[in-house]
Image: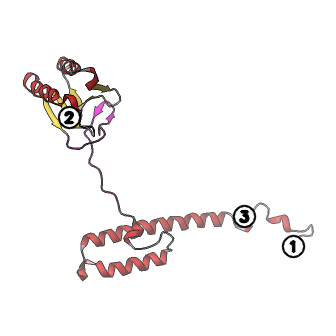
Amino acid sequence: MITIHVKPTLEGGRFVKFNGDDPHVFAECVARLKAFPAYARRYDPQLKSWHVSADCTPELEDFLASAVIDFNAQVKRAAGVGGTGWRSKGGRDEQPQPRRAAQPDPYVVLHLLPSAPLPVVKAAHRALALLHHPDRGGEVAAMQKINLAYEQIASRLVARSNRNLIFCTSTRWRDSPRRHSCLCASGARSPA
């Protein structure tokens, strides 16, 4: 059995990809697709898929209908438009993954500037938590966004302060290799 994946393109054409275990059926499907005019089809070896232009959409639909009848093929149509959405990993073809929603900027959620210090971030979180807490009539989703934004900003600021602390402790005066440069021969400090 062979599976034919079809996905629309931005130009109105279609991406066509074959998956199957029968090489004779696979070869016959490719041969039928190669019967399309040369200007209307193109093979992409990286994605292992065919691009059929919008001019041949009726012929492609006829081809898909005949493949279902002749080869008992299964046709899967993707709803998305644009790009191919197919990646090949280890010889295995995968369907496009749904896109994740973009995360809002945590500083915008807490109504802060990116230069805000940790005490200001804590105060803004507390004030918004008092307004939007579910026990006080707020929405759970709003409170989750506020908590997530606070956790992201606080973890960044704590990591930054830890990096600064490590930098400061490693470059203190007593750890400096030139700390003895200001000592006299007698061991007493020279007047600065």
Q: Earlier in the sequence, mark 3 or mark 1?
A: 3
| Left/right of residue 128 with respect to residue 27 in the rendered view | right
What x and y, as percent, mark residue 112?
A: 44, 73
| Residue positioned 12% across, 27% down in the render | 62
Residue 108: percent from left, percent from top: 39, 69
Q: Which residues are magenta?
A: 78-103
- For image coordinates 32% across by 36% down, the residue present is 87
- Which mark's residue is nearer the viewer, 2 or 3? 2
Amino acid of disc 1: Arg
Identify the image quadrant of the C terminus.
bottom right
Query: Quick check: 9 left or right of 114?
Result: left
The amino acid at mark 2 is Val
Which residue position is annotated with label 2? Answer: 6
Q: Which residue is mark 3?
A: 175
Q: Is residue 31 visible?
A: yes
Per the image, label 3 sits on a secondary structure element best described as helix
Direction from residue 27 to residue 109 in the image, left or right: right
The part of the image, by quadrant, that contains residue 104 is bottom left
Residue 1 seen from this side: no
Percent of width and height locating residue 126: 38, 80
Q: Is residue 25 left or right of residue 39?
A: left
**Residue highlighted by disc 1:** 189
